[in-house]
Amino acid sequence: MKFKQKKLKAENFRYVIKRVIKNPMIYLTDFFGYQTQIDHWMRTISLTLNAGACPEMACPDVLENGFHCKELIEQVEVAYVIYKQCGLKKQRNPLAFFRTRDDYFAYRSRGEYAFDGQINPADTLSKFFSFQSLKKWYGTLDDIMLSLTQAKTTNYDRFGDKIAIIQELLLRLAQAMYVIYRNGGLPLQVPSYVIAQPSDTFEGKMPLSKLGELIHSIADKRHAEAAAELESVFEKAYGGTEPEDIANPDDRGDEQKDHSEDGVMTEEAPE
């Protein structure tokens, strides 16, 4: 019996929109390119998870708590889109993080989440959704958000030892998503005879968030100011004309060679 794969639709997610489902690189470029840096994001995840596991660490009055949980949920959703669209398989033992000693020392010395000697974001996504489904990840992150709003609680067994696994998987997922952004896509191992042909490619300029647009406008303004300042320097020094002999030193050398025949300058013959 064949089962038809359910199509991913925006209405089935909380935050992911249609164009991101069509091309998850839109989200990755906006998030890691304009909103945050990977080291900042991973520290935010650690702090959020620790505060969620121990409410005494939480700051209920800090509005960013809910925003960071929303960011976590959105990133998990985008990761799920990639996981399903690339046809990644579930693993029987998703918590086997290190296959070799080199993988272990790669993490200790360089902070790299390697598996069998390679940084493999596809393996990380597979482990993440093999541990629990998207629906259960929703429940986990909702519980963390709820804990962040409570300064005290008597229920310390809400997550139990599971909190360590949750934090490790979320940190690994964040780095995997960053690697996909940095590489411009998700590399997958396929047989040598397979010819890859991207489908549903995104054409045109990627739309930016409001923050991304603001950063671009500031950068464009600074470039324009720098160009205007440089132009004024040239006008004062050279009367509004660019010094061609300085801008093109090779041309000046040719002129010197031409005048050498008139006795103005002679070149020594190479030995």
Image (spheres, rainbow, N blue to C red):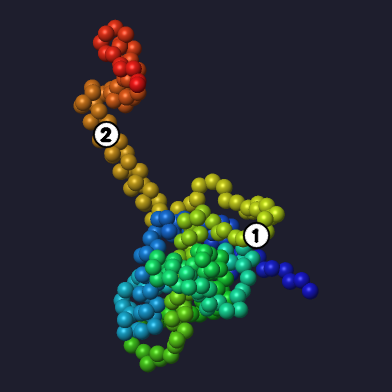
Q: Secondary structure at mark 1?
A: loop
Residue at 53% across, 73% down: 99
Q: In the rendered image of this protein, does residue 243 appear above or below residue 185?
A: above
Q: Which residue is mark 2?
A: 230
Task: Establish if 148 lies above or below 154.
Answer: above
Secondary element under disc 2, as helix, strand or loop, is: helix
Point out residue 33 in the picture as x, y percentages from the top left corner: 42, 55
**Residue 205 image position (x, y, % from top left):** 50, 47
In 3D space, how far apart are the residues under numbered discs 2 and 1 (Cα atoms)?
52 Å
Number of labelled discs? 2
Res 1 visible: yes
| Image point (58%, 76%), residue name | 130
Between residue 63 and residue 136, name the one nearer to us.
136
Q: Position of residue 176 (x, y in %)?
A: 49, 65
Can residue 14 be seen at all in this image of the molecule? Answer: no
Q: Residue furthest right?
A: 1
- The quarter in which the N terminus is drawn is bottom right
Residue at 32% over, 41% down: 223
Q: If you read the primary sequence from the N terminus, does the residue marked by circle 2 or circle 1 appear first? A: 1
Q: Quadrant of the rendered structure where residue 252 is?
A: top left
User: As shown in the figure, which amino acid type bears the numbered disc 1?
Assistant: Val
Q: Which mark is residue 190?
A: 1
Q: Quadrant of residue 46 in the image? A: bottom left
Foreground of the two, 90 or 266: 266
Q: Nearer the viewer, residue 167 or 199?
A: 167
Quadrant including the C terminus: top left
